[in-house]
Amino acid sequence: MSTSDYSFFKGVERSFDKAAKFTRFSAGILEQIKACNSILRVKFPVRIGDGVEVIEAYRVQHSHHKLPCKGGIRFSMEVNQDEVMALAALMTYKCAIVNVPFGGGKGGIKIDSKKYSVFDLEKITRRYTSELCKKNFIGPGIDVPAPDYGTSGREMSWIVDTYSSLNPNDVNAMACVTGKPISQGGVRGRVEATGLGVFFGIREACAFEEDMVKLGLTTGIRGKRVIIQGLGNVGYHAAKYFQNAGAIIVGLIEYNGAIYDANGIDVDMAQAHRAKSGSLLNFPNARNIENISEGLEQACDILIPAALESVIHKDNASRIQAKIIGEAANGPLTPDADEILLRKGVLVIPDMYLNAGGVTVSYFEWLKNLSHVRYGRLEKRFSENRYAEIINSVESMTNKKVSEVERKIILKGPDEIDLVHSGLEDTMMGSYQEIREIYVNTPGVDDMRTAAFICAINKIGVSYEELGIFP
Ligand code: GLU
C-alpha cells in the first residue's frame, strides 16, 4: 500500500509532465490544465448513538473547462485531500479521453462504512449533501457525484433525495447525481458499466496482432489467464465478462485472502464461498495465498487491479509476471512501478482510459435525466416496424422465408440496456484506437499512459485556448 511520504497527486503531476513535453501548449495553459480549481473541506457533526462524531469530508473540482464537474464519492479511512485531488485530476483526463463533456471532480468522506449502521450512513450522506448544497458544490450544471469505492446506488438515492428537497423548483434535480437505482432515475447498465468497460478496453488491446506478438501472446481473450484484485462492483463484473468470453480466471485477491488455481476459478462460486465463509480462502481446488500482495505476483497473462491505489510499487513491481496490466482501479501503480514495468516490456493499460466506462454511462444517465425520457422509448416500436417491412421486402424479392429464429433477432428494436451497452462499447473501442494512434505515431512515447495523457491534454488545451481566459 502507499507509503506515507508518497503523494498521489504529485504522482499524477509527474505523469502529466512527462506527457506535456509532447504537446504544443504554452507553460501557462499546461499549468491551468494541471491545477485543482476548487477544493472544499468540511467537518460536520453527526449524532451517532448517544454521542456526536465529527466527520471529515471533501469535494474537489479539479477542472471547470467543461461543466458540470463529474466524479464519484468514496467512503474510506484513506480519504485525505491529496488523494481526492489526485482522483479529481484523473477524472478530468478520463472525461477528455472518452469524449465526455465534463470537468473532473471527486469527493470523499473519511469513514469506515463497515463501522456504521445503515441509518447512520444515511445521516452522514444526507448531511454531506446539504454541506455540498450550501457551498454550491452540487447541481446538474455544477458538479455531479456518482458511486465510487465504498458507495453505491443506495447512497446516490439519499443524495438525490436530499438535493431535491433543498431545491424543490429544480426540474432537473434528478441529474444532480448519477449511479442511482432505476426507480430513482438511474439508467440501465450503470452498475456493470465500469467492469464492462474494463473488459471492452482490454479486449480491444488484445485485438492488435503486432502488439500481442511483442508480448508473446496471441490475439483475443479466449484462453488468456487472468488475475483480478478486488471483487467489488468493478472487479466482479470485469471477472464475469472475462470468464464469459472464455478467459481463465486463475487468481482472485481480496483484502483478507487470495486464491490461485491454474485450471480456473468460477467467479460466482468463489463469490458465494466468500459470502458464506467471510473470505476467499479454502475455496475447493484452489491454493491459498495468505500474504495477499503475493497474489499479484502469480503467473498470468493479464493482471487487473480493481481495488485501491498504489498496490504495485517499487518493491513488488519487478516480481509481477503478467504481460498486460489493466488498471481497473484508479492509480494502482506508482510512477516508480510504471518505470520498472515499462523496462520489463509489460503493456500497462492506464486507469484514466480503462475505468472510464463508469463515467461514460454516467454521462448517458445525466442525459436521460435532462431529457426526462427513457432511452429507446421513442424509437423501439418504430425500428421494429421498419425491420418488419425490410424483411417482408427481402422475402418477396427473393421468394424465400426468413426463419422464425432469425426473424425474432432481426425484428428486435433497441431497449435502454442495448443502447447503453453499445454506446459504451463504441466509446471504449474508439478511445483505445485514439490513444494507440498517439502511442504508435509519437516518437519518444513508449507507454500507453503517456499517450493517454497526451490525448487528454490535447483536447483540454484546445478547449482552454478556444474558450479564452477571462481577463
Ligand atoms: N467513480 C467512478 C470513477 O472513478 C465513476 C465516476 C462517475 O460516474 O462520475 O470513474
Image (cartoon, rainbow, N blue to C red):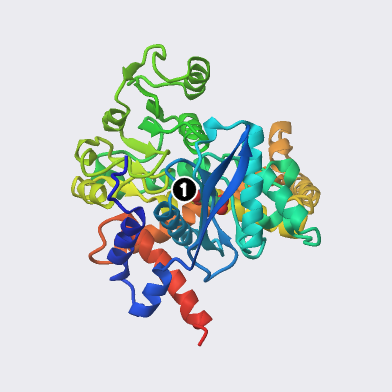
47 to 89, vertically: above or below: above
Residue 226 is situated, as x and y percent measured from the top left of the image, at 37, 32
- Quarter residue 303 falls in: top left
Q: Which residue is mark 1?
A: 355
Residue 154 is situated, as x and y percent measured from the top left of the image, at 65, 39
Residue 189: in sight, yes or no?
A: no
Residue 125 is situated, as x and y percent measured from the top left of the image, at 62, 45
**Quick one: SS at disc 1?**
loop
Residue 75 is situated, as x and y percent measured from the top left of the image, at 52, 42
Q: Is mark 1 within 8 Å of ligand 1?
A: yes
401 to 163, vertically: above or below: above
- The front one of 366 and 152 is 152
Residue 30: in sight, yes or no?
A: yes
Q: Amino acid at mark 1?
A: Asn
38 to 280, vertically: above or below: below
Question: Residue at (65%, 61%) from the top-left corner?
Answer: 134
Kindly give the residue lying farthest to the front in the view shown: 51
Q: How many marks?
A: 1
State the quadrant of the N terminus. Answer: top left
Question: Residue at (80%, 52%) from the top-left corner?
Answer: 382
